Image (cartoon, rainbow, N blue to C red):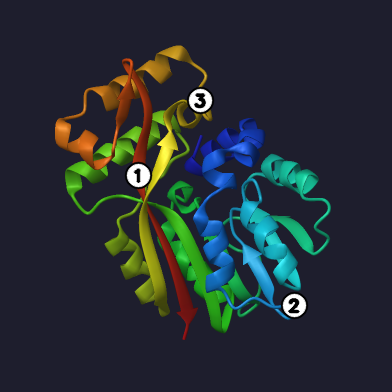
Amino acid sequence: MNEKDHVKQVFSKNKESYVTSSTHSTGSDLELMVEWLSLGLDKTVLDIATGGGHVAKKLSPHVGKLVATDLTKEMLENTAKHLKEYKNISYEVADAGDLPYEDNSFDIITCRIAAHHFPQPKKFVKEVARVLKPGGKFLFIDNVAPEDPALDKFVNTLEKMRDYSHGRSLRISEWENLLGQEKLHVQKDKTKKKTLPYQEWVTRTLDDEDEIKKVRDYIWNADVDTKEYFQVKIESDQITSFAIDELMVLCKKQ
């Protein structure tokens, strides 16, 4: 099974949990998207890897047309069912690294908390630049790895243990390099620590007790500096939460 098949399998199985996930359905970044983007009823938006449809739902009332795409058909069908009242959203199965659209098709492109699943982020950014209109805006949000190699290895190993469809959380410097190569110029950016409720996070993709224990032990046995960086909280001998880095960036195609 290849990486994309892993993604389809995981998201098909857990399609409902990504609709209800507190990490995905809430967050100040959803409000900021509306503030940062120049929205209007004359705008056509592409939401890549829409997942539970939270970006599509947020932006739909402010734009003329929104195309929500996802690699996983079952995920997309479930999201369409939840968002059936939003009449200007259409749903299309699409690969982020091989978008089925003409050059210069969209005024705005968004992608939120998904790219760490993409096996070829360089192709994804290249495709965004291709289908985005000149002067168009690309708003990107994702988990990112620290620049420190040891912390990078820790968080990516952890994510892969918890979700085998995880590809890699890139470092901010890597995303800046990819965006720059495609002349997607950063206009605004924001980084933050995102606190994850541990139990909800680990059980979103795992139900095997042995696998859950391995994830728990990996965090538990981390060194003091790593636990401090990721803000691991332990109460009554239970991990209750930890925090990862998230990047939000607004780019303009020159």
Identify the residue position indicated by label 2 in the image.
41
Real-space Cα separation, disc 2 to disc 3, in angstroms: 39 Å
Residue that badge 3 annotates = 203
Q: Nearer the viewer, residue 145 or 28?
A: 28
Find disc 1 in the rendering and name its residue.
Answer: 244
* Residue shown at the point (19%, 47%) measured from the top left: 149
Q: Name the element at disc 1.
A: strand
Residue 245 point in image, percent of width and height = 34, 50
Residue drawn at (74%, 56%) of the image: 91
99 over 238 or under it: above or below: below
Q: CA distance from mark 2 to mark 1?
A: 35 Å
- Tell me if 103 is positioned left or right of 172 in this view: right
Residue 94 lies, in percent from the top left, at 64, 56
15 vs 194, left or right, is right
Residue 6 showing in the rendered view: yes
Q: Are marks 3 and 1 in contact (CB under 8 Å)?
A: no
Dot 1 amino acid type: Ile
